[in-house]
Image (cartoon, grey):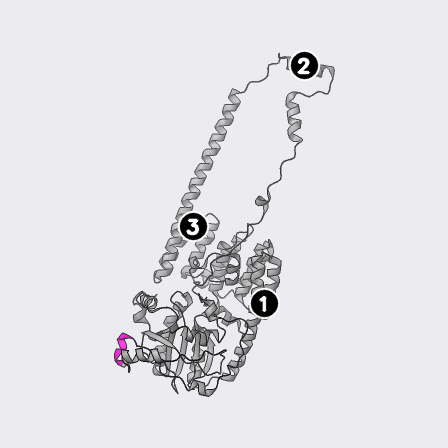
Amino acid sequence: MLSIDKFRVLFSVCLCGILAIAIGCEPKSSSDKGQATDKDASKLTSSGSKAADSGRSEKDSEQQTQSLTSGDPRNADDSSSSSEDLTTAKTKAKPPTIPESLAIGDVAPQLWIDDVVLGDNDTAFKPGRVQVVEFWATWCGPCRQSMPHLSELQNDYKDQVRFVGITREDKETVSKFLDQQAPSGEKTWRDELTYTIALDRDDVTSQSYMRAANQNGIPTAFIVGQDSHVEWIGHPMMMEEVLAKVVAKQWDRAAARAEFEEQQRIDTIVSEASRDLRAALNQQDWEAALKKIDEVLAVVPDDINFKAQRFIILFNADRADEANKSVKELADEFGDDPRILNMLAWQLATSIAHPDVDLKLAEEIINHAAELAADDPSILDTFAAIYARQDRFDDAIAAEEKAIAAAEGNPRMKQIFEKRLGELQAKKKAAAAAEEEKEAETNTDSTDSDDAADTSEAPSPETPAAEAATADDDNGTEGATSDEASTEDETGIEAEPESESQTETETDTPPPSDESADN
């Protein structure tokens, strides 16, 4: 079972993907944390669990051949094949067999590469050399975050380890991405990355690794050992210690395989429960959804994603007290992790429409997060969201401006925050206009009341009706004046109850992920 630290590293603002899909929100794939779900999940995932043993022989692995790629123009001299030879080879080459399953300890499938857009074409497995095969995409925020780290590792290990990043996107898309400015703000991705970027050919490599290993989130890295066997599968930001042991021949492959198989068993249970959870959410059967969430948490008690989904469902079930209490418990449990604290406060401020959401608690949580990471632009952005929810637009605008300044080195994040600043300024203007309109209506109503009082005439005591009323009073009758009768009629009618739409609790849904930057 994965440790709580691993779940913290894997956590993303993408957050709550199952819930977002079920309730109709856009998936949070660009939370810029954890892993993003591949856009063509049907091509990368398989139903149910896969057998741990691939059933392939050692002979199959010996059929690996050198990659059929043209190489990076910067390293054209390194290519041992001419363009004509490569074209002929690609035409005649037969794709490798896609394995039914892939686990730690299995022989690594051959890489079926269409082209190399960065680095050299030396992607074939070689005896004595460790290779890291990483799957990524240009649209994936967590992938972009991992890339500088992979470059550092490539620099550290030099010829001992070969890093290859593989994407299923086309050459034009990847080339345009590489020519964009990297987060450092000093270089383009093409100049900053130090490892090979290759294009998958006909999705064969993705299916041979990702689908066969039952991996459905990117980035995902596969460490292939010196004997061409898979040593480890996981998030590239978590592999540094493992990689060092593999290179030093100190890695316990058998223990890693046992852990992997146990995780596959857990993933199967979680996957089946998640299908039932989605069905319950689609039907807005909150109690059934809570039951399924609890079943999952019994298997993965440290999973912050499901814990966060649980308190959102509690709000939907109109159990706000329990939901707020759950958030407080999570804030205490993860009190040393500013990213998770930021996520909790962000969810309370932006994802929960319930009137009893504890915004004071949200403010307490984000203040604590700021104590741990004062200069984190996403935390400053969450301050702005909380203030805006409280209609404190001046404070919200000031906080967003600070977030923009703190995000100076991240153009993409800065752009998102600038958009939010414009939205806050528009909301402030709209709120001011609404207040002016309300004051104008109040003044108009007051003037109309004064005019009505001035033009009304009191009934003359000499009218026949008044005389009749006086006579009745003098005679001691129980008759009522017309004004009294009117009052009786009004008080005898029950006021209509408020409509159901006014008393119903609004359904809570998480915000679209692409708008949430790192939150």
Say if 194 sits above or below 466 in the image: below
Q: Nearer the viewer, mark 1 or mark 2?
A: 1
- Comparing 435 with 90, the one in front is 90
- Name the residue type under label 2: Ala
Q: Residue at x 43, y 74 (%)?
A: 206
Tell me where residue 436 appears, x and y as whole percent.
Answer: 43, 37
Give the side of residue 272 with respect to residue 396, left or right: right
What residue range appears in magenta?
A: 72-77
| Of pointers 2 and 3, the one earlier in the residue sequence | 3
Q: In the image, which disc is placed on residue 426?
A: none
Q: Distance of mark 2 from mark 3, alpha carbons?
A: 68 Å
Q: Nearer the viewer, mark 3 or mark 1?
A: 1
Q: Residues within 10 Å of mark 2 (few under 14, many from 20)?
A: few
Q: Are marks 3 and 1 in contact (CB under 8 Å)?
A: no
| Of pointers 3 and 1, the one earlier in the residue sequence | 1
Q: In the image, which disc is placed on residue 296?
A: 1
Q: Which quarter shows the N terminus?
A: bottom right
Q: Distance of mark 1 from mark 2, alpha carbons?
A: 82 Å
Which residue position holds label 2? 468
Q: Residues within 10 Å of mark 1 (few under 14, many from 20)?
A: many
Taking the view exactly as shown, the residue that stands out farthest to the left is 77
Give the side of residue 372 with respect to residue 164, left or right: right
**Magenta stretch: residue 364 in it?**
no
Task: Answer with the quarter of the image where residue 249 lies.
Answer: bottom left
Q: In the image, which disc is placed on residue 395?
A: 3
Q: Distance of mark 3 from mark 1, alpha carbons?
A: 40 Å
Q: Are marks 1 and 2 in contact (CB under 8 Å)?
A: no
**Magenta stretch: residue 75 in it?**
yes
